[in-house]
Amino acid sequence: MFQSIHFNAKPRAVTNASKPEVLGKLEQIVGAANILIEPEKVEPYGADAVKEKFPPEAVVFPETTAQVSQILKLANEFTFPVTARGGGVGYTGGAVPVDGGIVVGTDRMNRIVEISPDDLYVVCQPGLTTYALQQAVEKYGLLFPPDPASYKDSYIGGNIAENAGGMRTPKYGVTKHSVLGLEVVTATGEIIRTGGKTVKNVVGFDLVGLICGSEGMLGIITEATLKLLPMPEATATVRASFKTMKAACEVLTKFTPEGLLPMAMEVIDKNCVGAIEQNYAFGLSPDAGAILLVAVDGAKAQVETDARLIEQILKENGGFDVLRSASKADEDKLWDVRRAISPSLMKYGTLKINEDVVVPRSRVPELISKVEEIGRRHDTFVANFGHAGDGNIHVNFLCDRDNADSIARARQCVKETFALSVELGGSISGEHGIGYVKAAYLDMAIDQPTLEVMKGIKRVFDPNGILNPGKMFV
Ligand SMILES: Cc1cc2nc3c(=O)[nH]c(=O)nc-3n(C[C@H](O)[C@H](O)[C@H](O)COP(=O)(O)OP(=O)(O)OC[C@H]3O[C@@H](n4cnc5c(N)ncnc54)[C@H](O)[C@@H]3O)c2cc1C
């Protein structure tokens, strides 16, 4: 359905006959070396982590903001769809051109413009991986806190557009909490700058907050000013097993009264524990109904004190097999269990539908027991793990990719899990976003008047609907 030439996103648009002219103009803008049109070369740009394929008609790699602006002006003139792409590891098809048109790859906009250790910010282009950025600022003893598990592949532009989270969210927040300023080319090709180089800045509307999480639908981010912090001297992790998920999650509220703010609190349910143990034989207890990992960071002596206190709290609240890291190598070993989850689960199905619902963290046990019930009712294996500290749980339904009935049952589980998350005071996505994959469920989480405001904002930024069509509002 999406294979045909789509340089006509809107009825008033030009016909296929314009394609050579459009391609010629794109080549003039970015140069012949920065455009791909051969089917085998554009194909990889038609998929992300969802792995469904919608190849674009061309991929361009601008090197400057001015080029991005010219591309978007051309797209408005000829009304063809444009989809921005970062590392292409999104989980909701955000970077996939479902309505055809062109992909704007940000790979060649990968420079660090400025690092200011005195003012604690870095200015960079969007095509840099989170890992490369972290490596660069680490040389100055600084930390860029957002740490999605995809940090080696995902780009800063993609992380901002998805407002990505990570393990360190309980202490440091999500990506938007580390963005000070942005340069964005709106869908009409206007270059706007919002925010700045200071933490405090209340002049005008908070467009930084609006662009964070806008999934490439309002504009293309061409430069970001990001907040940095001093790199903590040390980290430590404590891992414990619990009889039940309820017991594991109840501990989460015991840290604050002791003056503790762990940077990460991750939970793993019994189905994951069973799968990991079968695959890796780490020696996890068969009595483990859940595993909790708690990590702290800060000055070395304080980290040591905090980790001991956490160990004590976990033991006093039903934790068993409690292990506290004494070195970086120890810590890595404790986290191996967490890293082993995804490969271990593939034993239970050839297709893993990984959702990322979020609820207030006190409701996590209820979420998980009700999700298990949903899985049982639809004869679908379900495994839960994730960011218990902020209530963002990866609910995984395993099914058979060659069996339509198995997939349909898993999809029904997803729908009921979304409804459940909203009912528990949460929402349908904590970090992966909506893209095209969850677009049909958006109104389960957002009421109609609010949706209308969002659509109005989209129209202001993108009156011709050329930027990332087929996403979010469908
Ligand atoms: C193994 C794995 C682990 C993951 N772990 C996490 C995790 O811990 N936390 C988390 O939040 N997510 C996680 N994700 C999901 C994904 O990595 C994040 O959503 C990430 O931020 C996507 O970045 P990207 O550069 O790959 O973006 P892409 O997939 O390329 O694009 C994502 C969206 O951003 C838009 N976009 C990209 N660049 C720009 C730009 N310059 N301007 C405007 N819009 C742009 C695209 O149009 C698209 O809508 C994981 C994914 C995988 C495969």
Image: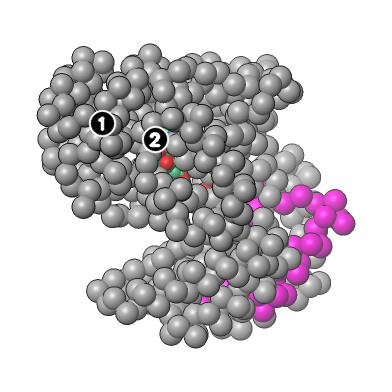
The residue sitting at 38% across, 14% down in the picture is 66
For the magenta stretch, what is the residue range?
244-273
Residue under pointer 2: 465
In the image, residue 411 above or below residue 27: below
Tag 1 near tag 2, CB within 8 Å: no
In the image, residue 287 above or below residue 136: below
Q: Residue furthest front?
A: 12
Does the segment drawn in magenta span residue 259?
A: yes
Does the segment drawn in magenta span residue 90?
A: no
User: Looking at the image, which is closer to me, 324 or 229?
Assistant: 229
On residue 13, which mark appears?
Answer: 1
Question: In the image, which is nearer the foreground, mark 1 or mark 2?
Answer: 1
User: Looking at the image, which is closer to me, 420 or 129?
Assistant: 420
Instruction: Report whether residue 447 is seen.
Output: yes
- Name the element at disc 1: loop
Ligand 1's quadrant is: top left
User: CB of residue at label 2: within 8 Å of ligand 1?
Assistant: no
Give x and y (percent) for residue 304. Answer: 75, 50
The residue sitting at 49% across, 29% down in the picture is 461
